[in-house]
Amino acid sequence: MRKRGIIGTLLLLVYLAGVGLFTGPSLAQIFLGRLPQPRLELIPFADMISFVNIAGNIALLFPLGLFLPLFWRWFERAGRTIGWCFGTSLSIELIQLVAGGVTSADDLLLNTLGGALGFAAARLLMRACPKLAPTGEGRAEWAAPLVCWIVIIAASTISDLLILW
């Protein structure tokens, strides 16, 4: 992995750790049976209550949409980056569903929109300064972000277990 990939991976780990801490319940709560009552909201645009809710959900995955194409060439296509942001948001919502909390279709849509806006910002940055565009690496560039997300989920679960025991 090149220096740029290492920097991207470290930045992504720090960002995803923040997302993991911010978005709520961990898997440790599942294992220990200490779950709040889950709430499922599947009707789109039904619970967009405030500007803060809307802006917060868009802002949550904006950095992911920005980082992915700036550090890994595999994410230079909008569909790949937006799909990755959708998958990340879906995994957050599913964890919240299982671990108690609010699982909302609005969150999924707004998080994905934030990732798409981040991708658009990355494309604008790379057009303005072509040196920001990553050069080709391997075909498995998608693996670093996936490993980062798995590490964050595992680390938050382990840390919660250590705190609770």
Image (cartoon, helix red, strand yellow):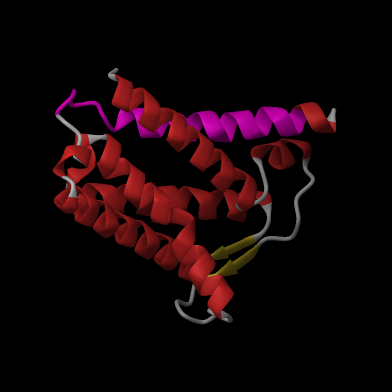
Q: Which of the 4 image quarters holds residue 136?
A: top left
Q: Total marks drawn?
A: 0
Does 1 sit left or right of 157 as displayed?
left
Q: Position of residue 143 (x, y in %)?
A: 32, 28
| Magenta segment includes 147 | yes
Does 48 sit left or right of 84 as displayed?
right
Does 130 sit left or right of 19 as displayed?
left
On the rendered image, what quadrant is the N terminus found in?
Answer: top left
Does 46 sit left or right of 142 as displayed?
right
| Magenta segment includes 14 | no
Q: Residue at x 53, y 65 (%)?
A: 56
Q: For this rendering, which residue is in front, 33 or 127? A: 127
Q: Residue at x 50, y 64 (%)?
A: 57
Report the magenta stretch's main SS. helix
Extreme right residue here? 165
Q: Residue at x 58, y 44 (%)?
A: 18
On the rendered image, what quadrant is the C terminus found in?
Answer: top right
Extreme top residue here? 1
Q: Position of residue 98 (x, y in %)?
A: 62, 50
Looking at the rendering, the stretch of residues picked out in magenta corresponds to 136-161
Q: Which of the 4 image quarters holds residue 113?
A: bottom left
Q: Position of residue 25 (x, y in %)?
A: 67, 48
